[in-house]
């Protein structure tokens, strides 16, 4: 898929076919996430890829809006070193976006899931105390009818409102 | 450019040819950023695109490592609504990554620049108090010899170290 098409057409969706994600596809998607940059190339981001049903169910308690996540074929828990500083969540966003855009290019849908209870994630996945569970990204083959891109387009503000020139009101 | 190639090969670089970025190219890059997702599609992210030399020079005081940024042809100041909550910087990262990947696909290099002094940015660009200047992204045509991708490859941890399976040590 063309890069600009992938970047423009990816939407966050959370209903998936009940079928596993192909291992080779998943490896390519994870690899694209791996190559995302980080402040000073410290590489504070690590992933835990969850496909075991019991583990996915246990992760439902990690977020206030996460009751559905055990139905995603794959959950990718994005973690970041606790000492990564103020740019930690920015770097998490870069890695997650690479993951989701690569997934879209490979025919997968995805959605970020906010973690409200990081201690749940830490306990379920045996994540050490100096590592912060930062975000969960669900991944799967989209339901027919949610096939990207057109059918599920979320509206966006026009470019003229999104980007000003040389000053806030420019 | 193929999406996975763009995601894998993009590196953060900060030396650019002294030439402007083509308007049509810049518009496509900004549009790719615009289409990035956000929590609940609230769309709290807005950009200020800076090309005026005096404005770029004034923005050098915004960061502790930003003395070079007036030499970038374009600075994109990524802002986020102050009430966007804990996912604000994650969404900023998603938008910035779309911007940088689209730029790479269009032959531009880029680099995030940390803002240590948001009040400087606010004053220079007349950004309201309820909007947070979150990150600056530099953009430009790369110097010969820094042409992406191979020559400037920053090393990354191997995939086996980057992504665990079903638990932290899995």
Image (cartoon, coloured by chain):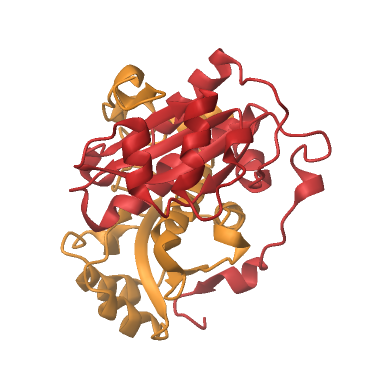
Chain colours: A orange, B red
Task: State which quadrant residue B157 falls in.
Answer: bottom right
Q: Residue A20 location in percent, x, y?
A: 45, 58
Task: State which quadrant residue A75 falls in.
Answer: bottom left
Q: Residue B14 location in percent, x, y?
A: 66, 42
Q: Residue A93 location in percent, x, y?
A: 42, 53
The residue shown at (61%, 73%) is: B161
Residue A106 versus residue B143: which sits nearer the camera? B143
The residue shown at (58%, 35%) is: B70
**Is any atom of residue A75 visible in this view?**
no
The residue shown at (44%, 80%) is: B167
Residue B86 versus residue A122: which sits nearer the camera? B86
Q: Residue furthest top?
A: B24
**Is any atom of residue A87 visible in this view?**
yes
Which image quarter is the N terminus of chain B in? top right
Residue B61 versus residue B166: which sits nearer the camera? B61
Q: Residue A22 location in percent, x, y?
A: 54, 55
B81 to the left or right of B99: left
The residue shown at (33%, 17%) is: A160
- Give the vertical position of A26 relative to A61 (above or below): above
Question: How many numbered marks does the figure carry?
Answer: 0
Residue B12 versus residue A129: which sits nearer the camera? B12
- Give the vertical position of A138 relative to B102 (above or below): below
């Amino acid at each position: 898929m063309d890069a600009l098409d992938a970047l423009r057409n990816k939407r966050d969706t959370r209903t998936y076919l009940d079928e596993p994600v192909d291992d080779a596809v998943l490896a390519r998607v994870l690899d694209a996430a791996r190559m995302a940059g980080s402040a000073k190339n410290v590489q504070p981001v690590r992933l835990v890829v969850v496909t075991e049903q019991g583990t996915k169910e246990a992760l439902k308690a990690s977020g206030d809006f996460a009751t559905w996540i055990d139905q995603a074929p794959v959950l990718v828990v994005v973690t970041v070193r606790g000492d990564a500083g103020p740019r930690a969540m920015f770097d998490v966003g870069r890695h997650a976006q690479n993951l989701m855009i690569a997934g879209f290019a490979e025919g997968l849908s995805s959605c970020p899931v906010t973690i409200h209870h990081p201690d749940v994630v830490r306990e379920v996945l045996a994540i050490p105390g100096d590592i912060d569970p930062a975000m969960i990204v669900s991944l799967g083959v989209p339901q027919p009818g949610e096939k990207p891109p057109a059918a599920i387009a979320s509206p966006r503000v026009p470019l003229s409102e999104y980007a000003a020139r040389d000053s806030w009101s420019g």
